[in-house]
Image (spheres, rainbow, N blue to C red):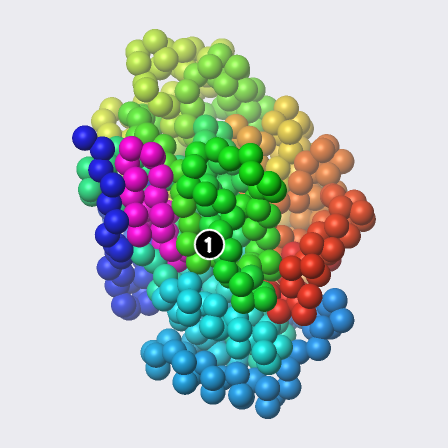
Amino acid sequence: MFRRLAVGFRIPRPSASVQCLRGRLLSTRSIPLSSASQRWQNLLLGTFIGTGLGVTASWLAYGSGFLTTSVSDYGSQYGSTDDFRKALEELQHALPPASVSTLPADLTAMGSVAPKTTSSHGVVVRPTSTNEVQHVVLVAKKYRIPVVVHGSGTSLEGQANPLPGVHGICVDLSAMDRILEVNEADCDLVCQPGTSWNDINVHLSGAGIPLFFPLDPGPGASVGGMISTGCSGTNAVRYGTARAEWILNMTVVLPSGKIIKTRSRARKSSAGFDLTKLFIGAEGTLGIITEVTLRLAPVVPTTVATVQFRNVADAVSTVLKLLNLGVPLQCAELLDSVTMRSINLAGGAARKYDDADALFLKIQNPTRAILDTVKATCEAHYGTRFELATSPEDADVLWADRKNAYFSNYALMPGARGMATDICVPVSRLPQFILETKADLDAHGIIGPIVGHVGDGNFHSLLLHRTPEEEAKAQAAQDRMVKRAIALGGTCTGEHGIGVTKKKYLKEELGEDTVELMHTLKRAVDPHNLFNPGKLYP
C-alpha cells in the first residue's frame, strides 16, 4: 500500500566540522557508508583537508584578485556601514540569538570550495523557515544590503563567496534541511533546500520506500545549491539533469520580499511560463529557494562493470554503441590513464588497475543477455580486463573507486592545488576533444587527469599546480579548452555553473543579445542587485 508521509523529518548531523566533512565527502552512494567507503576515509579526509589548506594559502597569497568585481553593477548603491549596523540590530532582534552570527570563524567559513577568497561576509544568518528568510530579505531590502545564499558549500565556481569590499548578509540554509512530505503513490517528495541528496535517499531507503532522487553531484551537495547551479552527476546519462522534470515546484522568496510558488505539485502543467526553470541555474541571483517538490524514480537493480581500453576514442565509441543498442546504462564513466594511475598511487582501491583508459559502467536490470551484450561490445572495441561485480557489495567497492577518483588525483602531485574544468560537448565530438586536450596539456607540461560522464559528453580535467606560474599555465589551458569546446558546439560548464570563474566565457558561448536578455531579467526581478551580486552575469 502506498504511503504518504508528512513528518518534518530531519536527519541528525554530527556537530564536529571534521565529522561533517567526512560524511559529506566519503559517501559512495545513497546508502550509509559501505566498507568500500571506510577504506577511503583516512586517505580522502587527509587529502581533502590538506588540499583545502593549500588552496586557501594559494588564494590568500596571490589569487584573490581574480574575484574582484564592481559593486556598482546595475547602478546599485549599497547601504553604508551605519545602514549595515541598523540591519544587523534588526536581525538580532527578530531572530533567535543562535541564528545570527558575527563570529570571524563563521564569516570566513561561509563560501565555496573553490576558488577561495580573502573577503568575508558581514553577518551569517541561519533561518529555519520561509518566513524567517522573508524577514531577512525585507531587512536587506530596507537597508540595501547584498545577500549571498550558502547551502552546503560544495560549489566549485565561487557561487557562495561574499562580495568583496561590502558588508553583506550570508543566508546559510544548512538548518533548513527537513524532509517535509513523502508522497509514495505520486513518486514525489517535499523538502527544504538545505537537505542533501544523499540524506534524501538514505531516508527513503530506511523507510522501505523503493524510490530515490537520481541527481547525484558531489557528496553532500544540498538540493537548493543543486537547483541553483543546474547540476547533474553520474546518473545523467539515464536520468538527465536538474533542468529536466525532476524539480516540480519551488517556494521562492524574491528580492522584493514576496513569496511565490512556481507551479503546483501536478506532474505536468501548461499554465503560463515555466517559472520553475527560471530559477534553475540562476545561482541565487533571482530568489532564495525555501521549499522544493522533487520527483522521485523507482529503484531498480544494478551492477557495475569495469573495462580498460587502448585509448579514449575506443572507450567513448563503446559507450555510444551500447546506448544505440538500447543497453540500460545508469552511468557511463570514463577515467583516463592518468586518473587510473592516480588511483593506484593513492592506495585506497581494493584492486590494482592497469594505467590505461577505463570505463566504469553501472548497468540497470542486468540480465544475462544484457551483460553478454555489454561484454561483447567492449571486446569489439578492443576492451580488455572486463570485470563484472560478483555481488552488490563488490559493486559498491568498484563504484567507490570511481566516486573517489577526484581525491586520488592529488596523489599525482603531493601538496598541489587543483583547478577543476567542466567542459561539455556533443557526445560524438568528445573523443576528438579529449585527445586534443591531452595533447595540449602534455605540450605545456601540465598534469591534468580526466574523468568524464561520457554518455552525455561532459568531462572534468583537474589541472594540478603548486606555484603562481603553474596556476597561470593551468588557467591558460582552461581558456583554450573552453574555446575548443565552444567551437565544437559545446559549453564552458556542463554541471558546475558559472559563478565568478566562468563569467568571462558567457558572451562568447551565448552571444551578446542572449546575455543582455539575462541582464534584463535580473534588473526586472532584482532592480537593486541585492541577490548574489558579482556572480553569473558578465
In this picture, residue 83 sits left or right of residue 34: right
Q: Where is residue 489 shown, x and y percent of the image?
A: 72, 33
Location of the C terminus by quadrant is bottom right
- Comparing 76 with 493, the one in front is 76
Observer able to see residue 64:
yes
SS state under label 1: strand
Q: Where is residue 77 shown, x and y percent of the image?
A: 71, 77
Q: Is residue 26 above or below residue 359?
A: below
Q: Is residue 123 above or below residue 528?
A: below
- Comparing 208 with 421, the one in front is 208
Verify whether residue 293 appears in magenta: no
Residue at the spot of label 1: 251
Location of the N terminus by quadrant is top left
- Comparing 228 with 161, the one in front is 228
Observer able to see residue 343:
no
Verify whether residue 184 appears in magenta: yes
Q: Where is residue 22 shown, x and y percent of the image?
A: 32, 57
Q: Is residue 472 above or below residue 209?
A: below
Quarter holding residue 119 = bottom right
Farthest residue in the front direction?
271
Farthest residue in the right direction?
512
Q: Is residue 298 above or below residue 226?
A: above
Count neighbours of disc 1 (C-alpha within 10 A) and say few if under 14, some if 14 to 19, many if 20 or more: many
For the residue marked with disc 1, what is the amino acid? Thr
Residue at position x 31%, y 26% in the image: 300
Q: Where is residue 534 shown, x and y percent of the image?
A: 66, 65
Q: Which residues are magenta?
A: 179-200
Residue at position x 66%, y 78% in the image: 78
Residue at position x 62%, y 69% in the image: 530
Residue at position x 24%, y 24% in the image: 390
In this picture, residue 136 sits left or right of residue 183: right
